[in-house]
Amino acid sequence: MIKEPTFESISQISRKLLGIPRVIVSGGEPTLRKDLVQILDQLRPDHEIVAMSSNATMIGPELAAELSSRLSYIDVTVDGTREVHNKIRGQYDLVLAGIRNLIEAGVELSLVTVMFDSNAACVLDVCRVADELGAKKLKVLTPIRKGRGADVVERGLSSEEF
């Protein structure tokens, strides 16, 4: 829960990442940054792969077009059917609209689903959505113990259940 870094501090970090082949821009939500395109422009020339994690809710056609030439792929989280996703994260329809804008702009899609006790039964639904959207990857993850995720880790599956 650190403060949002300035563009200058991100530039310093970026210079320290030279030689790292893959960089994933994440957050919080990267699309909330007004300087997102400038950050990606700074990263793109120095890295083989520049990706981003997003909930996609704020990705309209214009931003999707901007991202298409700057990202190797984007990770977007879908945690189940509309009903289940909305109980976990909300805004399912906005997520799907953002994904469709990304696909239309030619951004390679990678779906992510975080396994909780409340959505484990939906994993095949997420597989179907990934297939229907033409996702190149589907990542199935456990909750991450940081930021807001620290409050939901106990709702995750045990190793055996996972």
Image (cartoon, rainbow, N blue to C red):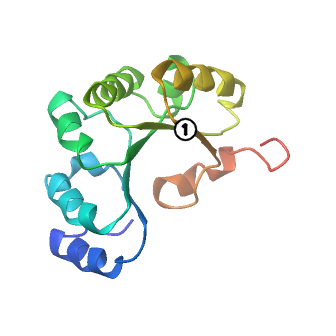
Q: Quadrant of residue 92?
A: top left
Query: Residue 152 at x, y = what percent?
Result: 59, 48
| The one of 159 and 23 positioned closer to us in this rendering | 23
- Which quadrant does the C terminus fall into? top right
Q: Is 123 left or right of 133, judged from the image as shown?
A: right
**Residue at mark 1:** 137
Say which residue appears at 25% left-offset and 35% top-offset: 58
Residue at 39%, 43% in the rendered image:
74
| Dot 1 alpha-carbon crowd within 10 angstroms: few under 14, some 14 to 19, many 20 or more | some
Is residue 34 something that shows in the picture?
yes
The answer to whether one can see residue 25 in this image is no
In the rendered view, does 93 fall on the left or right side of 118?
left
- The residue located at (28%, 24%) in the rendering is 104
Regarding mark 1 in the picture, which secondary structure is present there?
Answer: strand
Given residues 117 and 67, the one toward you in this image is: 67
Does 4 sit above or below residue 18? above
Residue 107, by quadrant, is: top left
Q: How many marks?
A: 1
**Residue 83: percent from the left, percent from the top?**
53, 18
Asked if residue 55 is positioned above or below residue 119 in the image, the reply reads below
The N terminus lies in quadrant? bottom left
Q: Amino acid at mark 1?
A: Lys
Q: Is residue 63 left or right of residue 111?
A: left
Q: Residue furthest right?
A: 160
Vertical side of 36 occupied by 117: above or below: above
Q: Position of residue 123 (x, y in %)?
A: 67, 28
| Vertical comparison of 28 with 161: above or below | below
Q: Position of residue 21 (x, y in %)?
A: 43, 67
In this rendering, would 24 be left or right of 101? right
